[in-house]
Image: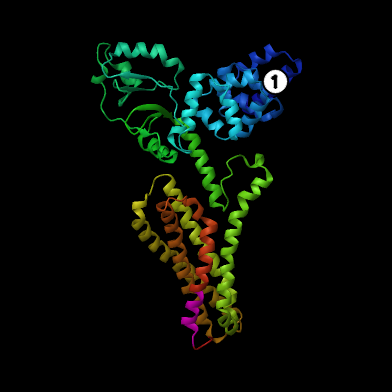
Amino acid sequence: MSVELENEGLIQEFEGIVASENKQVLADFLNDQNISDVAELINEFPEYEALIIGNMAVNRAASVFKILDISQQKDIVKELSSFKTAELLNELPPDDRTDFLEELPKNAIRDLIKLLNPEERKITLTHLGYPEDSVGRLMTPDYVYVYEHNSIEEVFATLRAVAKNTETIDVIYVINENGELIDDIRIRDVILALPGKLVNQIIDGRVVALNVNDDQEHANQVFKMNNRVALPVTDDNNILLGIVTIDDMLWVANEEYSEDMQKMGGTEALDEPYLDIPLLKLFRKRIGWLVVLFLGEMLTATAMGYFEDEIAKAVVLALFVPLIISSGGNSGSQASTLIIQAMAVGDISLSDWWRVLRRELISGLLLGSVLGIIGFVRVAVWHSIAPTLYGQHWNLIGCTVGFSLLGVVLWGTLSGSMLPIALKKLGADPAVSSAPFVATLVDVTGLIIYFSVAYMFLKGYLL
């Protein structure tokens, strides 16, 4: 049976149970389904989202809740009773609870924190005290730790006692009496070790840890470089505070990717699903960059006005303005997109700027040469078809177009590659320098290059 048919049967069964209004049957049905299938039911029947969450076992309800969109989470909490909301929030892992709460207004956060039990309230307030986008917001205090003097038998006793309430037992953390992180050991190493061995006999001292104030994007890179399912989080004194798991990193990577795509399109990050964001808020997110880019494009008109005399003497030059500036903008956008992507995945760092510059210098020369030759050939072909179109100096016009394309594409490539690196160096987000911003910059400078080359080739002939 196909997945679509299975989902269709699931939907029909759910509709029948809801119509019967038998809450016990509904609870049994929901608790028997996969978490992802319940999430699909919520997507299919948003009017029943609170009913679905409210009738599930609290541990399963929390598992569903944390994979829903923030807008769905907000709607569910609004509709649930205070008792059910308290149950749900107390059951959520601290990192997922923090992710949800930080999206709410301050008064709503205050009211919901009151519903938490004292221990969870303390953990949540600690998480919310860390800087936004820091590792501290992602970490969970639910992990297994042992001491270096423990035996393997004692490690297993610890696992049996506490592992049920921890997020993962794939990795066990070794600390000293002061709570300082010493090492981490994989569960496989514990299983294979002899019962009488001590923990300090199987550790290797090659622990990789994150600082609680590290940026989440940096943490994502550390995960990728070290192939870990979880990493310990310490403070500045190497005290073990919690762990960050790979599922949190996947959410971070997805959010970072979405934000970068939106910024590269010339808008602020939306921070919530497109269809759920209020229209006025969407307008505010987009209008700022549009105004900035519009003001930048106005410089293009200023540049055109500066070369008004040249255009009046050789009107034919105006025919190639769109060709020149679009080629420069395209090459710049292409280069910036490649560099931003390479920086995002860790292929290049700020220290690689000189290598990038050299590569893009060669690339710009090659790309510009190809487009320049095509531009010259285009003028030559059109002249052979209509000899009066460009006049007797068609070859000079062809050279002007060809060398202008070479210069503009080279400049666009260099600008597009260096701007993201420069912005990163200044502490800004390199994504904002992509397509629209680079294209606007290259449009203005491209005109200056074009008319400067035209003056060099056509002085004494058409100018």
Seen at 60% across and 19% down, the residue is: 33
Residue 98 shown left or right of residue 37 in the figure: left
- Quarter of the picture containing the N terminus is top right
Residue 164 shown left or right of residue 311 in the figure: left
Does 457 lie within the magenta span? yes
Q: Identify the main secondary structure in magenta.
A: helix
Residue under circle 1? Answer: 14
Let me know if residue 416 appears in the view.
yes
Q: Residue furthest left?
A: 201
Residue 406 shown left or right of residue 198 in the figure: right
Total marks placed? 1
Seen at 64% across and 20% down, the residue is: 82
User: Which of 386 and 360 lies nearest the eye of the viewer?
Assistant: 360
Seen at 25% across and 26% down, the residue is: 204
Residue 316 x/y as whole percent: 59, 79
Q: How busy is the neighbourhood of tag 1: few (under 14 within 10 Å), some, or many (20 plus)?
A: some
Q: Which residues are magenta?
A: 450-459
- The answer to whether 220 is drawn above or below residue 454 in the figure is above
- The answer to whether 245 is drawn above or below residue 402 in the figure is above
Does 257 lie within the magenta span? no
User: Which of 391 and 178 lies nearest the eye of the viewer?
Assistant: 178
Q: Residue furthest bottom?
A: 460
Give the amino acid type for the residue marked by disc 1 in the picture: Phe
Residue 14 x/y as whole percent: 70, 20
Residue 103 x/y as whole percent: 57, 35
Q: Secondary structure at mark 1?
A: helix
Seen at 49% across and 67% down, the residue is: 371
Q: Residue furthest right?
A: 19
Residue 111 x/y as whole percent: 60, 27
Asked where in the image residue 272 lies, by quadrant, the reply is: top right
Let me know if residue 399 appears in the view.
no
